[in-house]
Image (tube, grey):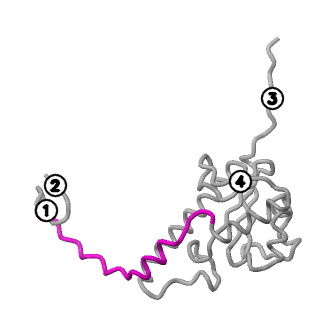
């Protein structure tokens, strides 16, 4: 028997869900233009790091969350977050006035996923540099990015931890210890 809405099955009749509200064509076009890769903030970070001589890989699928930039030489990943989509506490992170409950739940799921990704990466021994879209308007942060990736402390540049950049160092207990190589005699 078919258990789709509005179909009869063993337990009786499923209620027919209400139809979705009509979609505004302008809103649909606007949302279709939102990209997940090669965004303007991500491109700005990539250009600055590349100009500083740092080389990186993009969106490595073998790492949790497919980080935007992976600098294997420095054991660092860079996550470039849009303020709206990742729920930043700035002007750009405000919720829309329509369907507020739906957007709040969606953004909260994104934030929970971001937290889990950061924890997973730190657990694997990666240093996580999280850059917010609004922070890239500050030339001091853009200039400090290469040093942050190389391991500098954000406070050395007058950058508040968590406001426009977050640096999570790997969890020390889960870093690889020295290896013992046994040679056959």
Please rate how many residues cluster around mark 3, counting C-alpha atoms within 10 Å: few if below 14, some from 14 to 19, many from 20: few
Q: Mark 1 or mark 3, which is nearer to you? A: 1
Where is mark 2, residue-wise?
2
In the image, farthest residue toward the right: 156
Mark 1 vs 3, N-terminal side:
1
Give the residue displayed 17% in from the left and 70% down from the top: 15
Mark 4 vs 1, N-terminal side:
1
Q: Which of the 4 image quadrants contains residue 137?
A: bottom right
Where is mark 1, residue-wise?
7
Where is mark 4, residue-wise?
70
Q: Which of the 4 image quadrants contains residue 180?
A: top right
- Determine the secondary structure under disc 1: loop
Whether residues under marks 4 and 2 lie with C-beta atoms below 8 angstroms apart, the answer is no
Q: In the drawing, does residue 149 fall left or right of residue 99?
A: right
Where is mark 3, residue-wise?
180
How far separated are the C-alphas under marks 4 and 2? Answer: 47 Å
Please rate how many residues cluster around mark 4, counting C-alpha atoms within 10 Å: few if below 14, some from 14 to 19, many from 20: many
How far separated are the C-alphas under marks 2 and 3? Answer: 60 Å
- Determine the secondary structure under disc 4: strand
Point out the stretch of residues depicted in magenta: 13-38
Q: Is residue 21 magenta?
A: yes
| Closer to the camera in the image, 98 or 121 | 98
Mark 1 vs 2, N-terminal side:
2
Give the residue displayed 89% in from the left and 71% down from the top: 156
How far separated are the C-alphas under marks 4 and 1? Answer: 49 Å
Question: Residue 168: horizontal and vertical position, in percent?
Answer: 73, 61
């Amino acid at each position: 028997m078919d258990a789709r809405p509005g179909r009869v099955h063993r337990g009786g009749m499923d209620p027919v869900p209400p139809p979705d509200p009509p979609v505004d064509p302008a809103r649909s076009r606007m949302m279709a233009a939102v990209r997940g890769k090669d965004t303007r903030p991500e491109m700005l970070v990539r250009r600055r790091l590349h100009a500083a001589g740092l080389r990186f890989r993009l969106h490595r699928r073998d790492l949790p969350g497919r980080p935007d930039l992976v600098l294997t030489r420095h054991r660092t990943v860079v996550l470039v977050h849009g303020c709206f989509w990742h729920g930043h506490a700035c002007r750009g992170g405000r919720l829309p006035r329509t369907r507020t409950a739906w957007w709040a739940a969606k953004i909260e799921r994104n934030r929970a996923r971001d937290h889990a990704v950061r924890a997973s990466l730190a657990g694997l021994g990666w240093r996580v540099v999280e850059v917010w879209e609004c922070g890239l308007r500050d030339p001091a942060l853009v200039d400090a990015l290469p040093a942050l990736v190389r391991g500098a402390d954000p406070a050395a540049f007058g950058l508040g931890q968590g406001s426009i950049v977050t640096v999570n160092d790997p969890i020390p207990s889960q870093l690889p210890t020295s290896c013992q190589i046994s040679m056959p005699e």
